[in-house]
Image (cartoon, grey):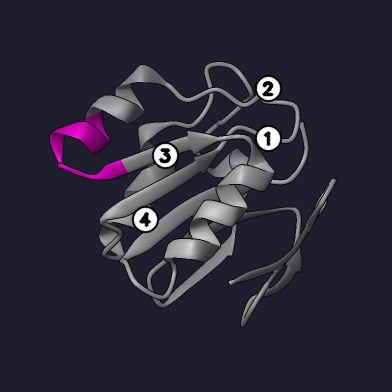
Amino acid sequence: MITHISWGRMVVEGLGEGKDFKLYPGGGRPWDWNETGTRHTPGIQPADVQELLDNGSQVIVLSRGMRMLLQTCPETLDLLMDKGIEIYVEETTAAVQRYNAMVETAPVGGLIHSTC
């Protein structure tokens, strides 16, 4: 569960505090955009979601940031759709609410961005 979200700060049960997180069934970690070269444009890369898939996510929540500046590459959405993954792409606070509502009942993963 994400227990706190505000500009630039998130708290996740069992993982602590950070800015951005990759979350998946049974765990997660801080999301370092530099690992895959992610930027606001073109946005979330297929490589960003691969770890979520590798860890059993069947539903994925992608946050767009607080100001909706983070985009998602079309290739990322194509990859998820091809695998039959249920996808939600939402503003960060809405994404957190959706993730929290599903975390106990579905194998949900999320990429949560706490700024822009």
Q: Calculate the distance from the C-alpha at mark 1 to the C-alpha at mark 2.
A: 6 Å
Q: Residue 88, which numbered label?
A: 3
Residue 57 horizontal/vertical position (percent): 30, 59
Q: Nearer the viewer, mark 2 or mark 4?
A: 2
Which is more N-terminal, label 3 or label 4? 4
**Mark 1 falls on what kind of element?**
loop
Q: Calculate the distance from the C-alpha at mark 4 to the C-alpha at mark 1.
A: 19 Å
Which is more N-terminal, label 2 or label 3? 2
- Looking at the picture, which amino acid does disc 4 mark? Leu
Mark 1 = which residue?
A: 65
Q: Nearer the viewer, mark 3 or mark 2?
A: 3
Q: Calculate the distance from the C-alpha at mark 3 to the C-alpha at mark 1.
A: 13 Å
- Looking at the picture, which amino acid does disc 2 mark? Leu
Q: Which residues are magenta?
A: 79-86
Instruction: Name which residue lies at 44% across and 69% down.
Output: 103
Q: Residues within 10 Å of mark 3 (few under 14, many from 20)?
A: some
Instruction: Name which residue lies at 85% across and 46% down.
Output: 7
Q: Calculate the distance from the C-alpha at mark 2 to the C-alpha at mark 4.
A: 22 Å
Point out the image quarter for the C terminus.
top right
Mark 4 = which residue?
A: 52
Point out the image quarter for the N terminus.
bottom right
Instruction: Name which residue lies at 52% across and 17% down.
Output: 42
